[in-house]
Amino acid sequence: MNFDERLKKLMDMGLTEYQARVYLALLKLGKTTAGEIPSESKVPRTRIYSTLKGLHEKGLVEIIPEKPAKYAPVKIQHFLESQVNSLRNKAQELETSFDTLSKEFAIVEEPRGIPKGKVEALFGRKAVKQKIIEIARNSQEVYLVGSNNLLARLKGMAKVELENKAYIMTNVNDEILADALRAQDWAKIKHISSKPQVQLIVSKNEVLISHPIPDDTDPNIGEDIAIWTNDAAITGYFLHCVNESWNDALELSGRSSPGKTLISIGMWLKNIGINMPKLFEELGRNTARELMQNLTSKNGDEDALFKELANFWDSHSLGKFNVESRQPLVITFENFVDCRAEKAISESICLFVQAFIKELFEKKLGKKITVEKKCLGHGTKCILAISMNEQKVISAN
């Protein structure tokens, strides 16, 4: 088999594409370090450790505790036996519960009597603008999804009509972050990673799907085409979809009030000309010292400290603290802050996180710590690589 055929065969057996690529690379390289894998596998360097972890859990990779850690492929026979046994057990379970499941999921006659709604085709941006105004006036809540030009268009189209009832989902990049933060005075706004080419407006009773032509910020001039309906079945379906999407979308400044506060402090300090990097580093160290007074894990106990930090982050709605790997030690903060603000503010927030971890780990673990950031660039996940030196430091009381 050629490479593509081998890749597909592994994916058919339940591996992700990244896992299949890394496993094939290891078959070729043999025992090797994580750093040698990206060039051979074509898997992004930032995804190597999580992919190796997944392969290890499937029994396809052996982790060799050397410095640096090395990884070796495991013969696929054990994995295949596990897959065969799993499928055999599932088949037996299905056969045993065949009659029960058939009754449980029997087809029920669809309810009748839902009246058909109206459908209209609209042409031109002014017509779309007028329809958005009508929907807003007739609704208590309106969901709006579109490209990162959506916010500017809506501001010129129907800001007054949408005020305090709009739920806007768009790709909040660096260029529109400041505008999005200000727009929270009149709308609720969340970030989505996709960049929709269509514009979707959904209320309880109406749906408007439009194609902005061109996709720019002008609220009045454009050759847009759109479809509107008040059909109950269609609006109900779309309302369910946008509700699900809203729950999955990201807050502009992370879930936590500390994250929002850091962004706001950074913007204020920048405006008055304060040296942010130095101040944020000191803030990170002081925050660690204050937190240590509330931690109960025993000094020097890494596992207990990591568990306590994860529980603390979760219980205080600060996002998610996670240890992605132990050798080398890599920790992540997800949705703690959203640092897609100006570069100077983002870099200062990174210094806050690094100083916080360095101070906390050195005092609690009694070792010299080096912290290196591994920024992903999208602003909602901080990745830190931690190096520990056996040289002792004064531990916290």
Image: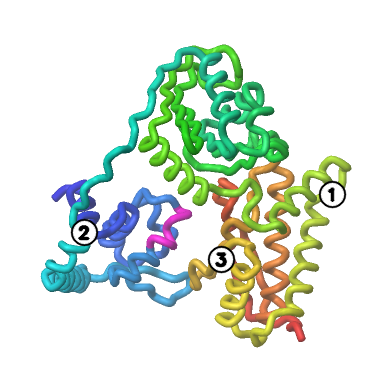
Give the image quarter of residue 189.
Answer: top right
| Residue hosting label 2 | 105
Q: Position of residue 228 (x, y in %)?
A: 43, 24
Magenta range is 45-51
Which quadrant is home to the C terminus? bottom right
Asked whether the residues under the numbered discs 2 and 1 touch, taking CB atoms below 8 Å apart as contact, a structural biologist would say: no
Return the residue nearer the eye: 283 or 327: 283
| Residue hosting label 1 | 275
The residues bearing labels 2 and 1 have C-alpha atoms spaced at a distance of 64 Å
Task: Identify the amino acid type marked 1.
Answer: Asn
Asked whether the residues under the numbered discs 3 and 1 touch, taking CB atoms below 8 Å apart as contact, a structural biologist would say: no
Give the image quarter of residue 139.
Answer: top right
Q: Position of residue 26 (x, y in %)?
A: 30, 61
Which tag, 3 or 1, sits closer to the chain's start? 1
Let me know if residue 50 is in the magenta part.
yes
Callout 3: SS = strand
| Residue hosting label 3 | 331
The residues bearing labels 3 and 1 have C-alpha atoms spaced at a distance of 28 Å
Callout 1: SS = loop
* Mark number displayed over residue 231: none
Which tag, 2 or 1, sits closer to the chain's start? 2
Residue 131 visible in the snapshot: yes
Q: Is residue 76 left or right of residue 242?
A: left
Q: Is residue 163 left or right of residue 200?
A: right
Task: Identify the amino acid type marked 2.
Answer: Phe
